[in-house]
Amino acid sequence: MKYFNFLGIILITLMSVISHTESFAKEQNEENIDIKINGKKCTQIKDGDLISLSLPEHYKTEDIESIKWYINFKQTNNQEYRYLLSEELYCSFINKPKIFQCYFSHPYNSVLRGFDWGNLKKEVCPNDCYFSCIFSTSNKGKNNISYIRSEPIDFEVLPSTPVLTLNKIWTEGQDNYPLANVSIDAENFEQGVILVEQSEDHLPIYTDTIFTTIPQDGITVYPGTWYNGIFCWVRNQYGQAMSNILKLNTTDIANKNHLSDFLIVNGHQIIINPPYMVTIKIYNTCGILEKEECTNNKINISLCRGLHLIKISDNKNNNFKNYKILIK
């Protein structure tokens, strides 16, 4: 008989635990931390924003005995990272670099490495973060521990993921050692680096060019051999972003006699130095022919301010190249 009584007690206890768990899950799903960003409802946090956190209104502040506010991130290694924000009844802070003892990263190739962030060992993703709160209440002599969290939030603080575009590949003397000119598209960065990944084994990586602004005419890179890859890393005080690896291809190598190689814009002039006979036609934006030249020698042509349409025809290979040139 005692045995059955004991089983009954266990069953009642288990049912109580299950009921409490279901109630807790329901409460967690129905309630969220109240977030205000600069006094308004928002799910994106930017540099310098004022974030204010509070419990739902029905909680009586006089019943709360202890409280802890956290921010929760997913690290780039998929582990969770939780940082204690405050143990006060209300939590507010201004977003600034390094405030959470971590740095942000966009997803990137795992073999790549960027800046040494020193004491900041946690590398976290800027998206799908959330705030959480653990607090205890006392009501009629009963102590309860509760947990609620916020909806997902994103940190809009990182540089944009840089995009590399290959403009031109060529060789000078040794065909096994190419040069490349690349354009970079990136925003909201303070410093950037063009890096070269040696061989398909990703070993080692060396720095080619450091920049703080993006040159309009691109950056010339010395990748070493055709097997190496080029990538770009950018950073600001919040974290870093990296491009995909740009692989070179011998089929992309430029012919030195290609039409695009012998037209230069210099102030109000265009300088054309073809290695063979070409026909140069200059049109205005209405399509009216303004000037025509046929030459196989270097020629300087002065242009007035405005947009000009230039067609260079290759009389040797029977092809042509069109340009739009703006003279300021």
Image: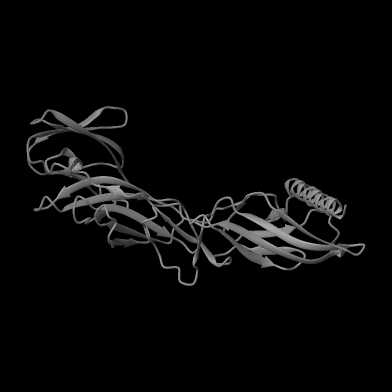
> Where is residue 146 drawn, in percent x and y?
77, 58
Count of numbered circles on the image: 0
Q: Residue at x 36, y 57 (%)?
A: 112
**Image position, residue 4 (x, y; %):** 84, 50
Q: In the picture provided, is 285 more to the left or to the right than 50?
A: left
230 or 277, which lies in front? 230
x, y (%) of residue 173?
8, 53
Q: Residue furthest right?
A: 140
The one nearer the camera, 178 or 17, is 17
Residue furthest to the bottom in view is: 119
Report the front residue among 21 and 33: 21
Q: Is residue 301 visible?
A: no
Vertical position of residue 47 compared to residue 14: above or below: below
* Spot occupied by residue 183 in the image (x, y as percentages of width and height): 31, 49
Q: Is residue 256 left or right of residue 62?
A: left
Residue at coordinates 75% horizontally, 68% vertically from top-left? 88
Left or right: 92 as drawn, with respect to 121? right
Q: Residue at 63% x, 60% y: name it.
A: 71
Question: Is residue 174 among what the camera can see?
Answer: yes
Establish if 307 lies above or below 110.
above
Question: Where on the picture, by quarter, is residue 198?
Answer: bottom left
Q: Quadrant of residue 130?
A: bottom right
Q: What colouring does the structure picture have?
A: one colour
Q: Reply above or below: 277 against 201.
A: above
